[in-house]
């Protein structure tokens, strides 16, 4: 039922697993006002909400793990991990401890690529979940020198496969991983890139502040001059042969070099922010609005 959570909670992110099963992370508005670190988790199963518990850490990102079982994989800023689904509920830790992650900086982005979940963060951290409780650091070659004082970091990661991965982040950096080595690519911007998407049209899209949108692959990148808006682009998704882009308060599709506002119908959301597409559906998750699209019409989830 719409309005189940929004009176007292704000949504942070989510991940669609099946067309009728999605995981959502949220925070309590009262605890946010008191500046208490936390996150709540729930699953939406064909219209029924189920509680998946609470953590004492805020979330950095969420993806769907595929091995050793398919389930929600929510990653905290300092490597704490909560997994739920397929009859299992447990927690893990990336690295040796939260303090070990904190020493390099917070994690910023999470994505399922191939059969594994990847997490990236400040200091160009990259972690891959090889199995339950087995997170491997794979950032050798991208990690800055130990005596470097430069502030660098990855904000997002995605890949066409596990041997064709792109990570983007601070100063407009674009890096590529071929499964064994990282290589920095030329970037047409020095503005922070906060999202990257390896789309089904073969293009890698990256987005950032003030409406910045890039397209390219390998060593060839360009700014897509859509001249449509200057809001920060927070998320990207590929759905039914279209690129969807979300800002904090709007959702758009890319039509050649123009952004077109999505027609939600009569029930307009006030917030958008995060996107998740899988199994034939696209979800838009804003702080106080969750909307689902089946390709024909939008429906409010909450």
Image: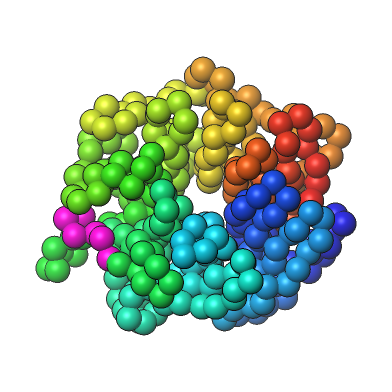
Residue 255 as seen in the image, left or right of residue 293: left
| Residue farthest toward the top in the current orientation of the protein | 256
Is 82 in front, or is 152?
82
Residue 241 position within the rendered picture, expressed as x and y whole percent measured from the top left: 56, 26
Q: Does the magenta stretch include residue 139?
A: yes
Is 142 in front, or is 270?
142
Check the image and report above or below for 287 versus 132: above
Residue 49 position within the rendered picture, expressed as x and y whole percent measured from the top left: 78, 64
- Which residue is at a point 42% across and 42% down the rendered structure image? 196
Magenta residues, start to end: 137-142
- Which residue is at a point 69% across and 67% down the rendered structure image? 42
The image quarter in which residue 190 lies: top left
Is residue 29 in view from this perspective? no
The image quarter in which residue 37 lies: bottom right
Residue 14 as seen in the image, left or right of residue 48: left
- Which residue is at a point 40% across and 60% down the rendered structure image? 119
Check the image and report above or below for 212 versus 173: above
Is 85 in front, or is 107?
85
Q: Main secondary structure of the magenta part?
A: loop
Query: Image quadrant for the N terminus?
Result: bottom right
């Amino acid at each position: 039922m719409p309005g189940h959570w929004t009176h007292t909670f704000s949504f942070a992110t989510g991940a669609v697993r099946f067309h009728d099963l999605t995981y959502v992370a949220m925070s309590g508005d009262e605890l946010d006002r008191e500046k208490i670190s936390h996150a709540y988790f729930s699953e939406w199963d064909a219209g029924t909400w189920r509680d998946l518990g609470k953590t004492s850490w805020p979330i950095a990102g969420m993806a769907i793990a595929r091995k050793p079982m398919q389930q929600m994989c929510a990653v905290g800023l300092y490597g704490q991990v909560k997994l739920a689904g397929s009859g299992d509920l447990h927690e893990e830790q990336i690295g040796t401890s939260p303090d070990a992650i904190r020493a390099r900086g917070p994690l910023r982005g999470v994505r399922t690529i191939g059969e594994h979940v990847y997490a990236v963060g400040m200091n160009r951290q990259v972690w891959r979940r090889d199995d339950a409780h087995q997170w491997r650091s794979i950032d050798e070659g991208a990690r800055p020198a130990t005596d470097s004082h430069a502030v660098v970091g990855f904000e997002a990661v995605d890949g066409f496969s596990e041997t064709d991965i792109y990570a983007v982040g601070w100063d407009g950096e674009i890096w590529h991983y071929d499964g064994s080595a990282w290589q920095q690519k030329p970037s047409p911007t020095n503005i922070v890139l906060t999202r990257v998407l390896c789309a089904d049209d073969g293009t890698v899209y990256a987005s950032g502040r003030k409406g910045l949108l890039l397209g390219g692959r390998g060593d060839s990148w360009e700014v897509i001059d859509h001249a449509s808006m200057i809001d920060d682009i927070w998320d990207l998704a590929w759905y039914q042969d279209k690129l969807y882009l979300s800002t904090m308060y709007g959702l758009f599709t890319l039509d050649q070099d123009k952004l077109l506002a999505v027609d939600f119908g009569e029930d307009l959301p006030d917030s958008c922010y995060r996107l998740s597409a899988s199994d034939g559906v696209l979800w838009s998750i804003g702080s106080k609005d969750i909307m689902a699209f089946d390709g024909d019409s939008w429906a409010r989830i909450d």
